[in-house]
Image (cartoon, coloured by chain):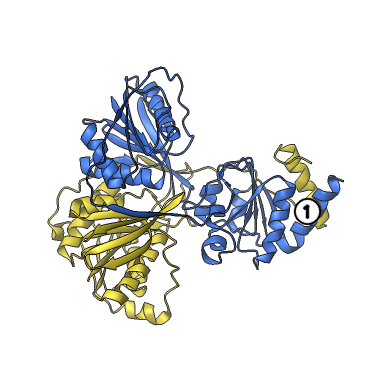
Amino acid sequence: MDIGVLVKASLDGNMIRADPDGRINIENTPLLISEYDRNAVVEAARIKSEVGGKIYVYTLLTWGPTKKKKKELENVVREALALGGDEAYAVVDDRVIPCDVTSTAYILSNLIKKFGNPELILAGEASMDMLSSQMPIRLARHLGYNVVTFARKIELSDNKIRVTRDLEDKLEVVETSLPAVISVTGEINRPKLPTLLQIRKAFAKPFKVVGLDELELEDTGRKISYSDLRLITITRKNVIIEADKLEDIADILIDKLIEEGVVRV
Amino acid sequence: MKTVIYGFSTEDLLDGLGLAQRIRELSGEELETFGFIVGAEPDVDGFDVIYKMGYAPTDAISKAILENISDTDIFIGPATKNGTDIATRLSAELDYPMITEVVDVDKVDDEIILKRQIIGGRGLAYYKFVTPITLTVPRKKFQPSKLDKKPEVKEVSIPEAKIRIIEELPKEKGEVDIEAAEVVVGVGRGFKSKEDIQMAFELAKLIGGEVGCSRPIAADFHWLGEDRWIGISGKKIKGKLYFAIGVSGAPQHIMAAGDAKIIVAVNKDKNAPIFKYADYGVVADLYQFIPVLIDRLKKRRG
């Protein structure tokens, strides 16, 4: 059975660049694979080892400028291929940037139908930059697939799929039928860094980049987009307590915490 | 505007009502508010009608909402996993835009602006408020006022759906609720063994707090239960003090701890990201500093 995996090239939370007015400078903020998407690829590889088939990696470049970011997207795709993907398909098109989740879901559904059309699709529970958790359900709606979110365990038998959902206060075991989209949480597995050999092999795997024209799409279906992305100004005090002896540092810290009213002695 | 607020408890409905009232205040438009509560009894005023239904899979819940209430302008649900799932199903079905975890609503140049946190709490995204729309709201961000309307309560049946719940299992669970704790001592990878965490418990006891931890401590090493894991997919803390020991400060961890009034960081790496998010930092080996701190605290108390 073929499996599709969605991966996103997300803004790197540790490398955010901002303009002097506080606006996030997307052009100069590097992209990296969304953390939970790595879990999704590794889970796809596990399922493949049981049932066989091919793993298709799908992505769309949501951040521009495309000229600069395409290279970073390629690195993300290579990582997904190194972690177990067999073939990759990416949409890169200036007309969709900046891309919101509704149009991304619409375009990806067309990409998936055209290339591979697998009956099981995995995705991370949320992207690490926008964290909106909408993609799996919106995509499933376009494909006409069933959808289950927040999986920490996936079991396949015949045409059924059993998913253990990881909720805040309990685990919920549910069952649905294929075709389906499943979003996975970070607890489903522990991805290792790909080995050098895996990375080298990834370069030999098929990777196709297309634009909207090849998908015969005109309207990107955009519904709502942010009007502004700003860095949160940190209002922490950032005081590093220094003294020659640890005892003195401890005393100063205790005094500060008493002053702040957060510790009582 | 027709507003539907759904959730799994009275608290969920109150959170949604708080956001709805804020939008009404800024837009000046009257709201017709419908509640939809799942698996609980509503104990709240301020709604025109409240529908109630037994617990069901999320696709059955979204289907029931759509079957019973039409022409909705604004859906508001809790920013929990199931709340987000249902919100997205409603939005996908009706092709509505959706904004998850709205943390603030403002009026700028005659336009209502919704804000949400992005990139692990390091950025804010601003969206123009439009209708129709679906929103999710974090716990206790918006407090409702003037709950005068007595709602009519209607019970609805659970529709057929594509997902079937087989069983519910308890989560591996300790007895702690770090989300409710005023003081949390955070354990990070700076700790070298499970036994060493005892130090954090001792400090927590002295300053009246609970012990929480970063992702690797719970998810990879299993030194502490998941109920102590501070992160976007773990617990979010919002007390008066977060005391992070040997925590480097991954974005997801920072976002979940960012609401604490005061943050203290102890880390031997002076370049650890956590220091940027801390009010007070101590650059020291936790194995040397924490015993000294515990000792000084004890001495002060005689």
Tell how many labels: 1
- What percent of the width, then of the height, locates residue B243? 66, 50
Q: Residue furthest left?
A: A216
Q: Quadrant of residue B36?
A: top left
Looking at the picture, does residue B103 appear above or below residue B231? Answer: above
Q: Residue at x 37, y 73 (%)?
A: A83
The C terminus of chain A - image quarter: top right
Q: In the rendered image, is residue B203 in sight?
A: yes
Is residue A31 visible in the rendered structure shown here? no
Residue at the far right: name it. Answer: B302
Residue under label 1: B294
Find residue A257 and report its image quarter. Answer: top right
Q: Is residue B166 left or right of residue B201?
A: left
From the viewer's side, name the closer residue of A184 and B270: A184
In the rendered image, the vertical position of residue A23 relative to residue B203, given as above or below: above
Tell me: B206 left or right of A170.
Answer: right
Name the residue: 39% across, 50% down.
Answer: A131
What subunit carries mark 1?
B
Q: The chain coloured blue carries which letter?
A: B
Q: In the drawing, does residue A140 fall left or right of residue B197?
A: left
Three-letter amino acid code at the position of disc 1: Ile
Colour chosen for chain A: yellow
In this picture, is A256 found above or below A250? above
